[in-house]
Image (cartoon, helix red, strand yellow):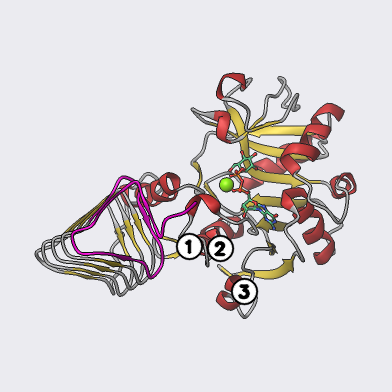
Amino acid sequence: MRAVVLVGGLGTRLRPLTTDLPKQMLPILDRPMIEHVVGHLATHGIDEVVLSLGFLPGAFLDAYPDGRCAGVPLTYAVEPEPLDTAGAIRFAAEDAGIEETFLVLNGDVLTDLAVDELILFHRASGAEATVSLTPVDDPSRYGVVPTDADGRVTGFIEKPPADEAPCNWINAGTYVLEPSVLQRIPPGRRVSVEREVFPAMADAGTLFGFRSECYWVDTGTPETYLDVQLDLMDGVRGPARSGVDDAAEVHTGAMVRRSVIGPGAVVAEGARVCDSVVMAGSNIGEGAVVDGSLVGRDASIGSDAQVLGFSVVGHGAVVAVGERLDGDRRPEQD
Ligand code: GDD
Ligand code: MG
């Protein structure tokens, strides 16, 4: 089966890390996010991936010049302008000549979903499309998807106010689609699969939901982008892994706990890095503290500076000696 992976979003919630790098090219531990996503598909028999690109497509083309990612052949569908999720699906499917049942993924989700079971469920129900579902505590950030006892979707409510969500099962961002779904997407304009296409299919009774309680995180915010990496280090998904790259330099008098330190990054004497991500080539100065925060590539945190509380420091950005960031972004975002 072929899979269309949506990676064309702007990644606004992760800015400034995503100002000049697509969200799915940010590292998760030691590899770009997209390699985790495609690698998971490879273990479930997906034999070709169509990357649906819009924003900064060159980053993917440069990273996978031979057209393979995590061992899977890639093709690229580059939208002339952002078409939103359904517009992107139609554009990519037509570009790749897909005329059979296919898979679609939000490219920013890390999950252990049994994709093969999702496909079996889809075929057994005779659905026109099947959406994977996961339970969450706060459904208001997601597409909320009530189903009946057979799994038929009875409504699709994208990002409802917190007190109006009819259940806590949400769209987990992996879909099996019959090619007929493409005819439901008006061509050549922005169309949202969550706000237009799936609600219409719920009304028509042709959309099914597949509930799964396996590991699932949408990595699109600083908190969740950090969480997935803490989970890998803590052994929540398989054996615990170290976040400190072999080519990182952590001085003996520095303290690093539950953190990713990328290749070429330096943590100087007396510095403390906890529950954080420090990307390749960055420098954490003497006595500096980085706690619960994200530091992009080639950034510089001055001596005795503090970077705290889900602060996000962009690639190449500088935090001055003794400066304190707490829940801030550098450079500042609107
Ligand atoms: N090609 C292309 N073009 N891709 C796009 C576009 C576009 O115009 N807009 C968004 N994407 C991609 C993003 O890069 C991402 O991989 C995926 O589509 C979903 O977009 P997000 O911006 O991450 O959406 P979300 O997290 O707010 O909500 C979506 O995901 C939730 C689960 O993670 C929705 O599908 C929700 O219903 C769902 O619950
Ligand atoms: Mg998302």
In the image, the residue with mark 2 has its CB under 8 Å from the nearest atom of ligand 1: yes
Q: Where is residue 96 in the image (x, y as percent from the top left)?
A: 80, 65
Determine whether, in the image, residue 263 is placed left or right of residue 105.
left
Q: Where does residue 120 sit, x and y in percent of width and height?
A: 72, 41
Q: Identify the mark at residue 304; answer none if there is no mark.
A: none
Residues rendered magenta in the picture: 306-334
Residue type, numbered disc 1 = Leu
Circle 1 residue: 26
Give neighbour class at mark 1: few <14, some 14-19, many 20+ (Cα, 10 Å). Answer: many
Q: Name the residue under label 2.
A: 22
Residue at x 80% of width, y 30% of height: 202
* Residue highlighted by disc 3: 58
Q: Do the residues labelled 3 and 2 touch (CB within 8 Å)?
A: no
328 vs 79: above or below: above
- Left or right of 252, for residue 23: right
Packing grade of label 2 (10 A; few <14, some 14-19, many >=20) is: many
Quarter assignment of residue 48: bottom right
Mark 1 in CB contact with mark 2 (< 8 angstroms): yes
Residue 46 lies, in percent from the top left, at 67, 58
